[in-house]
Amino acid sequence: MAYSNRNFVYHLRLIKSYFAGQAGGDVVIKVGIVGGTGYTGVELLRLLAIHPQARVDVITSRSEAGMPVDEMYPNLRGHYPGLVFSEPDTARLAACDVVFFATPHGVAHALAAELLNAGTRVIDLSADFRIRDADEWACWYGQPHGAPELLPEAVYGLPEVARDKIRDARLIAVPGCYPTAVQLGLIPLLEAGWVEPQGIIADCKSGVSGAGRGAKVGSLFCEAGESMKAYSVGNHRHHPEITQGLSDAAGQSVGLTFVPHLTPMIRGIHATLYVRLNGNSLKRNDVELQQLYEARYKGEPCVDVMSWQSCPETRSVRGANVCRIALHRPQGSDLLVILSVIDNLVKGASGQAVQNMNIMFGLEESAGLAFPGLMP
Ligand SMILES: NC(=O)C1=CN([C@@H]2O[C@H](COP(=O)(O)OP(=O)(O)OC[C@H]3O[C@@H](n4cnc5c(N)ncnc54)[C@H](OP(=O)(O)O)[C@@H]3O)[C@@H](O)[C@H]2O)C=CC1
Ligand SMILES: CC(=O)N[C@@H](CCC(=O)OP(=O)(O)O)C(=O)O
């Protein structure tokens, strides 16, 4: 196949960013964000405000075009002088090194190819490229897949699994919030083959910001502020995404019951995961189980394996790009309970997106992300 001009531009940018990263540093990554007024969009702005090597050049909103960013979000006052929301404009976005899509499903389908062709890398926070099979995506998302030709090159951006692929990727599908908490909680056991791959139960609780900023009756304070409810029992759209990741880890298809709940907190995901040890692994003691997790996540900057039988709190990861995990084995039974917590807007979305950007551009993986959670 002929080496096109587009490929040349892309590889030139890649080489420049790689060497700038190796040089330790003074590279400035030009960032565009599509969907800057939503919760994941403003979280990207908060994180990138203190990022040492990124500069937000373009931020879009159709409804707030013309509005200064720090007028809409006063927490950003002083951080983005002169930055104004603008209508999505592909030419301006294509002048960026990387564009984040913090938009509803379907938007990245429509715009990603043009940006990639211009040599801009794309990090999509929506589910547009998370499921490998276009027909399965269409089935769960209720619309035809808008860019099936891009699926083969899309990399599922869970750094703890796909770091090497992320490094060279042009198009990243940032994992969903529930899928991040569930996969990180279960991957060590599934990779090791120590648990029954059928009969996995993921009982998950989410804060209300998971539903986005758009006005919805279910997100009103009077509806969600002092109440808790399960929803989409057995048919949530994250089911195929979680199953895909867990099956990859297990090397065979897994059986999963996934029950999400809406809880009266603003941020946070708490996943309580139930699995049964299989045949030979029944003999494993608590120390071996704990060591499995500690070894699997050794050196991972964004995963914290807590001590045996700890109870991680969502507030301990509030605002932080961390997944905290703890293991329990009730009364020495064959049942293991794994607790996994993240902030849905950080490790579950925007923080993980920035982590991917850091890897793609050869920066320190936790650049701009190494701060603790907010307690109380
Ligand atoms: N909230 C969360 O915890 C998580 C969210 N995600 C995913 O991230 C994405 C964004 O979520 P979230 O920030 O919560 O969503 P919001 O509803 O809060 O914000 C959506 C943003 O997209 C813009 N937008 C909407 N439609 C279009 C369009 N057709 N073209 C261009 N821009 C558009 C909106 O601005 P405007 O209409 O003014 O253009 C707004 O800025 C979603 O796909 C979501 O599923 C992933 C993980 C966690
Ligand atoms: C509380 C709540 O409503 N959560 C959302 C999931 C978060 C989200 O935006 O989904 P993606 O990760 O697929 O982008 C939901 O259940 O639909």
Image (spheres, helix red, strand yellow):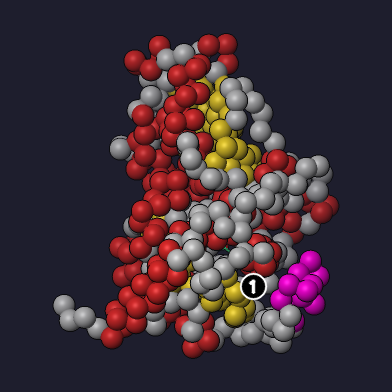
Q: Is residue 351 magenta?
A: no
Q: Residue furthest left?
A: 1
Most foreground residue, 166 or 369:
369
Image: 346 above or below 57: above
Give the residue drawn at x 60%, y 74%.
55
In the rendered image, residue 86, in percent from the top left (x then y), is placed at 64, 85
Q: Is residue 288 visible?
A: yes
Mark count: 1
Q: Is residue 69 magenta?
A: yes
In the rendered image, residue 35, in percent from the top left (x then y), is placed at 61, 73
Image: 337 above or below 31: above
Give the residue drawn at x 53%, y 86%.
92
Most foreground residue, 81 or 106:
81
Residue range in magenta is 68-80
* Quadrant of the drawing holding the C terminus: top right
Is 319 situated left or right of 117 in this image? Answer: right
Image: 282 above or below 184: above
In the rendered image, residue 370, in percent from the top left (x then y), is placed at 62, 51
Label 1 neighbour load within 10 Å: few <14, some 14-19, many 20+: many
Amino acid at the residue labelled 1: Gly
Under 8 Å from ligand 1: the CB of mark 1? yes
Element on which disc 1 rests: loop
Is 310 situated left or right of 334 in this image? Answer: right
Residue behind mark 1: 36
* Quadrant of the drawing holding the N terminus: bottom left
Quadrant where ligand 1 appears: bottom right
Q: Quadrant of residue 311?
A: top right
Most foreground residue, 23 or 370:
23
